[in-house]
Amino acid sequence: MHSKQAAIERRQRFDQQVGVYHQDMYRYAAWLSRDKSIAEDVVQEALLRAWKSLDALRDNASAKQWLLTIVRRENARYFERKRLETVDIDNLTASQAALLAEQPDEELDDMRQAIYELEDDYREPLVLQVLMGYSTNEIAEQMGLKQGAVLTRLHRARAKLKDQMARL
Amino acid sequence: MNCEDYREAIATDPSFDGGVGHLSECAACQSYRREMQALEEKINRALALDVPELHVPELPELSTPKPDNVIALPNRRWQSRTWFAMAATVVVAALLGVRLIGTGIEHESLADEILAHLDGEPFALRVTDIAITDERLNAVVPADIARMDHSAGLITYAQTCPIGGHDVPHLVIQGERGPVTILLMPDEYVAEPQRLRGDNVKGVILPVGNGSIAIIGEREERLDRIRESVLKSVAWST
């Protein structure tokens, strides 16, 4: 009886955290992989892994960072397994192109494509800062970088986007 | 603060609200700030992709270990006969492919359990140059388990974690290629070194006295050097 109650509470805790952070998990996965289908697969794997190791999450206040770290690892695993090659912007699969699906707002389209074309090293810290609200220190921890490197990448990411948008 | 400093700060984080004095006197930086904030608003909108409906995958049921199946390991100061019995039990359990830990998940080997554990503690693997305190190290590696000093390297994480049904010290030191995990397992006997290989990591479980020490790092890490320094820095208390 006691263990049944514990299992219910465990599931409730899982559902609660996933419910809050699912959107962040998906968007992070999508911008890491630049592919909607892969992002969905990565999130599914991440959810399974999170479920199995939920006991390692000692404090719910850390749940977002914990889940995003799992997504990052699952994405790395996915690409290591598949050994996917660099995406050529002119030769996208349907699923990759879906990420850039046309929006009524042309400016939004252009910006989305400019972000898509950013190198991984620049795109990821930008996503973590703008979408996830991470501080530069938190980004450094997540990406295993020194804070100075994060500042440089963020600066260059915005400079590249600014140049790209100015050219259009 | 001059124009260059201000622009660098605002390009790194457009919500930067410092440099008010400079900003109030510099029309060019005011204009640059507006420009960067407009760019930020566009980036924000572009990044906010539509998210498909959440489909939680089928989650495996995590069984609670039954008391009968849990290997009872009482106090640490065993006689040699007890050790032989323990070792035999561990071997039998390994042959049966049954290992139970606190969460009820079964692992086929000690190596599998260790890799699964590392996946569950991503926070441990952060790159930092801040060492844990002696008090923290002594709390996680109590004197009745082992003695350990800081000579193994820069220890940046220490936590007591369940492995093989025991609470063991889980430490992280900073290697040349990134964080390196050290698990001190005085109760996990292995007859010979066992290699570990995960998706992005490699490592070894070393037999040390009647227990073992696991060392896991990035694939490119020079673990042989770390192994030497770790073995010099640790001594079992029993």
Image (cartoon, coloured by chain):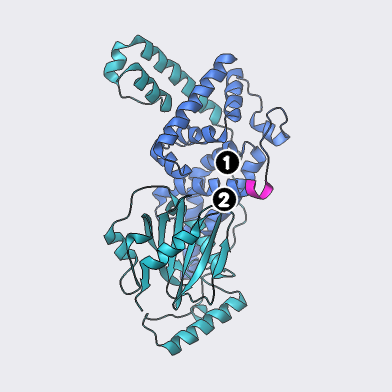
Chain colours: A blue, B cyan
Alpha carbon distance from label 1 to label 2 = 10 Å
Residue A54, position in %: x, y? 48, 57
Residue B178, relative to residue B204: is it above or below? above
Kindly identify the residue that appears in the image at 68 percent across and 42 percent down.
Answer: A84
- The C terminus of chain B, quarter of image: bottom left
| Image quarter of residue A114 | top right
Query: Could you classify mark 1 by the number of other residues whose Cα lies within 10 Å: few (under 14), some (14-19), or many (20 or more)?
Result: many
Q: Which residue is mark 2?
A: A46
Kindly identify the residue that appears in the image at 61 percent across and 39 percent down.
Answer: A33
- The N terminus of chain B, quarter of image: top left
Q: Residue furthest bottom?
A: B81
Query: Could you classify mark 2 by the number of other residues whose Cα lies within 10 Å: few (under 14), some (14-19), or many (20 or more)?
Result: many
| Image quarter of residue B208 | bottom left
Q: Which residues are magenta?
A: A79-83
The question of residue A81 being in magenta is answered with yes
Establish whether labels 1 and 2 are both on one chain.
yes
Residue A17, relative to residue A156: is it above or below? below
Asked if labels 2 and 1 touch by Cβ distance under 8 angstroms, the answer is: yes
Residue B20, position in %: x, y? 29, 19
Kindly identify the residue that appears in the image at 30 percent across and 65 percent down.
Answer: B138
Q: Earlier in the sequence, mark 1 or mark 2?
A: 1
Q: Secondary structure at mark 2?
A: helix
Disc marking residue A29: 1
Say whether residue B103 is visible. Answer: yes
